[in-house]
Amino acid sequence: MCSLNEAKQFQLCIRYQSAQQDGVEGFFRGLGRGIMGLITKPTLGVVDAVAMACDGIRRAVDLGHDVIARSRVPRYVSPYLALRPYNGHEAAGMALLESLVHGRYMQTDCYFAHAPLSDGDRPDIILISDK
């Protein structure tokens, strides 16, 4: 909004100065310049804001920071039940179903439950779906 106010002030200033110097012809020349300023200044402000955001992302990537990182596994949403509070166990089960055969079963099956069958670093897990 600051750029829009500056453009309006710039438009009035140019119209007044041109009218003083060149009369009616200068008034209309100043009006044209003012309208162009009214259009270009806010547009340049938006372009500048986008450029600054892109520059921040580039710097984060250059420094080796992850731009987007998940803090937890995505929520499991059942098609049969209402939305419930986040449950890490259900979310992990949904992630297991998604990891099977590169997500092929996500298209056809609906997750119900899972449970480990053994302890250890790589336990055997049973996963129950609707198919």
Image: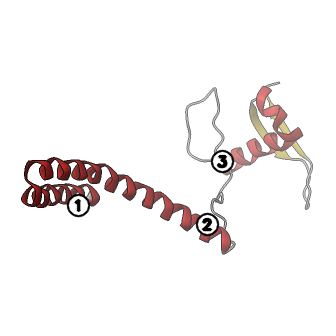
Instruction: Compare marks 2 and 3 and give the one earlier in the sequence.
Output: 2
Instruction: Please say if 22 is above or below 90.
Output: below
Q: Nearer the viewer, mark 2 or mark 3?
A: 2
Tag 3, which secondary structure?
A: loop
Disc 3 target residue? 74
Q: Nearer the viewer, mark 2 or mark 1?
A: 1
CA–CA distance in space, label 2 to label 3: 27 Å
Instruction: Compare marks 3 and 1 and give the one earlier in the sequence.
Output: 1
Instruction: Please say if 33 is above or below 57.
Output: above
Instruction: Please say if 55 is above or below 40.
Output: below
Q: Nearer the viewer, mark 3 or mark 1?
A: 1
Disc 1 target residue? 6
CA–CA distance in space, label 2 to label 1: 30 Å
Question: Where is residue 86 drawn, in percent x and y?
Answer: 59, 47
Horizontal placement of 120 versus 16: left or right?
A: right
Tag 1, which secondary structure?
A: helix
- Residue type, mark 2 in image: Arg
Give residue 58's mark: 2
Closer to the camera in the image, 50 or 6? 6
